[in-house]
Amino acid sequence: MPLLELEHISHAYGRHAVVADLSCALAQGAIGCLLGPSGCGKTTVLRAIAGFEHIQGGDIRINGTTVSSPAVHVPPERRRIGMVFQDYALFPHLTVADNIAFGLEKSAATARRSRVAELLETVGLAGAGGKYPHELSGGQQQRVALARALAPKPDLLLLDEPFSNLDVDLRERLSLEVRDILKQSGITAILVTHDQHEAFAVADEIGIMHEGRIQQWDTPYNLYHRPANRFVADFVGQGVFLQGDVLNAREVEIALGRLSGLIPTDCGAGCAACGKACRVAVLLRPDDIVHDDDAATQAEVVAKAFRGAEFLYTLKLPSGERVLSLVPSHHNHAIGEKIGIRLDVDHVVVFRNA
C-alpha cells in the first residue's frame, strides 16, 4: 500500500481551477517531486497534502487513511507531516538546538537532547547547537530547517522550493546532501520545484505538472528519454524537433537519415502500424548528435555556449533545420564553420505533428 495517495483531486480559487483530476501515489521511503513552471498548481497540491487547503474533489490518503476529501479534512497538526519552507522559517531568538527541539515539547528532556544531538550529526552541524540562525550561512540554516522538520519523525516530509534562496553551486551540493539525509532517515518525501536539476538530483519519481494536471509521473530517466507528450519533451532537458516521415512501424526518416525503433502510433491514426508515410515530429537531444570529422553530413555552427568540459553547439543542417549537439570543449569551432555530424540515437521519440 502506498504511503501517500492522491486520487482525482481538484481545487479552485473561485472560478479559476488550479488543480484538475490529479492522481499519483508514493511508496514508503520514496522521494517524489512535483515539477513544473510557475502557476501550474504544484504548490497548491503540496498545501492540500499538508492540510492548508480544503480540496473540492477527490481524496488524499496517508497510510490508507483519508485526510482530505470534500467531506473530510484532518487538521494539519494531526497528519504527522513535516514541512521545510523556502525561507527556512527559523525562530531568530532561539538557538539552533532549540529550533530543532521546537516540535518535541511533549518529549522528556533527555530524549529531546538526544534527538537534537542525533539530528545535528545527521545534517552535518554537530557542535553548532548553541549558535543562532543569523550566525549560520543559508545552506546551514536550510539544514537546521530540515532537522527541525525531521525531529518528530513524521510519516511524510514536504519540501516547498527549499533551495531557491541559495546560489547555484550550493543548491546543487545541498540537494544531493538532502537526498542522502532523507534516504538515511528512511523518510518519505515530496519536493516541489521549478528547477529540473534539483528534481533530478533529489527525487526517485517526478510528476511533470501543467495547467493543474500531471502530464507524466515517472523516473527521471524515462521523463528524459521516454516523454509521454510534447509538453514533457519540451520541458525536460533540451532538444529540438525535426520533421520526419514514417516508413513503417519501426523506421522514420529525418534530414539526418533513418532512425530505427518502435514508432508510436501517436504519430497518426495507426499509421506507424499500417506503414503510411505520415509526417511526424522527431525529438533529438543534444547527446543524439555526435561530432564526427569523418561523417558525410556537414552542419554549420550558428551558435555556441561554452560549458567548461563541453560546448553546446546550435547547428544548421543542409535542410535548413537546426539541431543541438554537445561536443567536448577541445573542439572549439567558429561561428559559420561547418563540422561533420552523425546520429547516435538510442531512444526514438516521435509525436504527431501539431
Image (cartoon, helix red, strand yellow):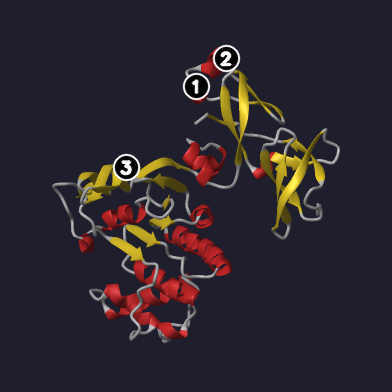
Asked if the residues shown at circle 1 and circle 2 are in contact, with their CB atoms under 8 angstroms apart, the answer is: yes
Identify which residue, 74 or 40, lies in the foreground: 40
Helix, strand or loop at mark 3:
strand
Please state if 183 lies on the left or on the right of 291 as rendered: left
Q: Earlier in the sequence, mark 1 or mark 2?
A: 1
Q: What's the amino acid at mark 3?
A: Leu
Q: Secondary structure at mark 2?
A: loop
Q: x, y (%) of residue 312?
A: 69, 51
Check residue 276 in the rendering and tell me which mark sits there, or answer none. 2
Q: Quadrant of residue 115?
A: bottom left
The residue indicated by pointer 3 is 22
Residue named by callout 1: 268
Q: CA distance from mark 1 to mark 3?
A: 27 Å
Q: Amino acid at mark 1?
A: Gly
Rounded to the nearest angstrom, the CA distance separating label 3 from label 2 is 36 Å
Q: Check the image and report above or below for 25 versus 297.
A: below
Q: Earlier in the sequence, mark 1 or mark 3?
A: 3
Q: Estimate the spatial distance between the alpha carbons at disc 1 and disc 2, rounded to whole Å.
A: 9 Å
Q: Nearer the viewer, residue 39 or 19?
A: 39
Q: Quadrant of residue 346?
A: top right
